[in-house]
Image (spheres, rainbow, N blue to C red):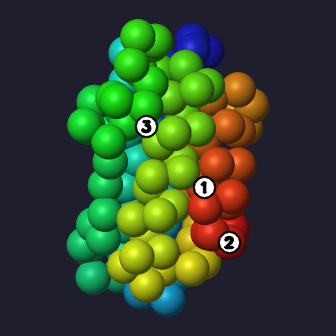
Amino acid sequence: MDKTARMTRRKRHIRKTLSGTAERPRLCIYRGSKTLNAQVVDDLSGKTLCSLSTLSAKISEKVAGSSKSNVKSASALGEEIGKMAVAKGVSTIVFDRSGYRYHGVIKAFAEAARKSGLKF
C-alpha cells in the first residue's frame, strides 16, 4: 500500500466516527507542503463557522520570514483559530486531524488551540 492510500484509509476511518454538531463543531486541519488551513465546521447544518490559513494577514505578520507550514506557523494558526472560535461562542470542539499523525505541526496546532480557550 502506498503512502497516499494509507493516508486516505486513516482519514476515512477517523471521519466515520467524527461529526461536528452545533454544540460541538469539528475543527479540521489541512497540512499542505507550503501552507496550513484550519476550519471549524458544523456538519449537521453543513456550515463553516470560521476558517483561517497561514496565508492570511493575521498569521503572515506573526511568522514573517519563516515557512508557512512549520511548527511556529502551526502554533500561530492554532492560537488565532481558537480565538475566532471562542468569539463565535464555541468552547468545545471535536478535533479532526485529517489522517495526519499527532506530532510535530499537528500537535503544535492542537496545543495552541487548547491554550487559546478551546476544549477538545
Q: Nearer the viewer, residue 75 or 27?
A: 75
Residue sitting farthest toward the bottom: 23
Q: Which mark is residue 38?
A: none
Q: Which mark is residue 119?
A: 2
Contact, mark 2 vs mark 3 (Cβ under 8 Å): no
Residue 33, horizontal then vertical, whole percent: 42, 14
Residue drawn 46% across the image and 12% down it: 66
Residue sitting farthest toward the right: 103
Q: Judge depth for marks 3 and 1 and give the one in front.
A: 1
Residue 71, horizontal then vertical, whole percent: 61, 25
CA gap, disc 2 and disc 1? 8 Å
Q: Nearer the viewer, residue 74 or 43?
A: 74
The answer to whether 109 is drawn above or below residue 14 in the figure is above
Residue drawn 31% across the image and 63% down it: 50
> The C terminus appears in which quarter of the rendering?
bottom right
**Could you tell me the amino acid type at mark 1?**
Ala
- The answer to whether residue 108 is seen in the rendering is yes
Q: Judge depth for marks 2 and 3 and give the one in front.
A: 2
Residue linked to disc 1:
113
Residue drawn 61% across the image and 61% down it: 116
Element assignment for label 1: helix
